[in-house]
Amino acid sequence: METVLDDGKKRMAGAITSLEKEFSKLRTGRATTSLVDGIIVDYYGTPTPINQLASVSVPDSKTITIQPWDKGAFGGVEKAIMASDLGLNPVNDGKIIRIAIPPLTEERRKDLVKIAKKYTEDAKIAIRNVRRDMNDALKKMEKDKDISEDDRKHGETEVQKLTDDYVKASDTSLAEKEKEILAI
């Protein structure tokens, strides 16, 4: 029964980690390197993440700089940034690509909050799916006479506590991200 609970804990924690990763890609008013982490560049016919062919840095809170190691990658990096759904315009001076992070409009902030809520709901669904799998595993163990009915009920109570904790953690993450997005 402990293995079922430990496995479930890991999977639920994974859902929260995934949620945090999705949140890091959401654009707030501040520049972060994680904004461009998900952008894939066509580098000599090979899809390559930006951070594998350039150094990405944040010199100030409103600017991201990207310095490709190969001069031939400048065009591909620029195209990939413009093609991404981030709404960013890169400026290439031949040595470095600068991306100015414009302030968010009120409407865009509200859209980002909606996206954050969708990501949170997806994480909650994943957590509930893990709960269902754990409960099914406990029922199977009871059916196979590995545990008693009382143990199964106790296990299901523990599973519900875990689920509640992780759902609460996802709500807390959402509240923090929402506050960050709406901060001007």
Image: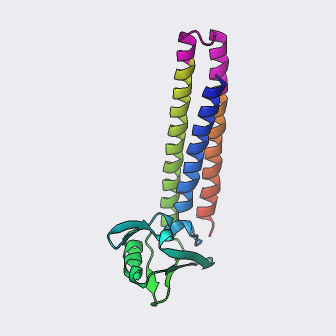
Bounds of the magenta segment: 139-158
Q: Is residue 46 visible?
A: yes
The residue lying toward the viewer, choosing from 49 and 127, is 49
Horizontal side of 103 relative to 175 (left or right) equals left
The residue lying toward the viewer, choosing from 183 and 100, is 100
Which residue is painted at 60% across and 57% down in the image? Answer: 178
Which residue is painted at 56% across and 16% down in the image? Answer: 141
Would you place residue 156 above or below residue 98 in this image? above
Q: Position of residue 37 (x, y in %)?
A: 50, 65
The residue lying toward the viewer, choosing from 172 and 147, is 147
Q: Is residue 163 visible?
A: no
Q: Position of residue 167 (x, y in %)?
A: 61, 39
The residue lying toward the viewer, choosing from 30 and 2, is 2
Q: Position of residue 94 (x, y in %)?
A: 45, 90
Q: Give the quarter of the image for residue 1.
A: top right
Q: Give the quarter of the image for residue 91.
A: bottom left
Which residue is painted at 54% across and 11% down in the image? Answer: 144
Which residue is painted at 63% across and 66% down in the image? Answer: 183
Residue 143 counted in the magenta span:
yes
**Quarter of the figure that contains the C terminus:** bottom right
Horizontal side of 152 relative to 78 (left or right) equals right
Residue 24 counted in the magenta span:
no
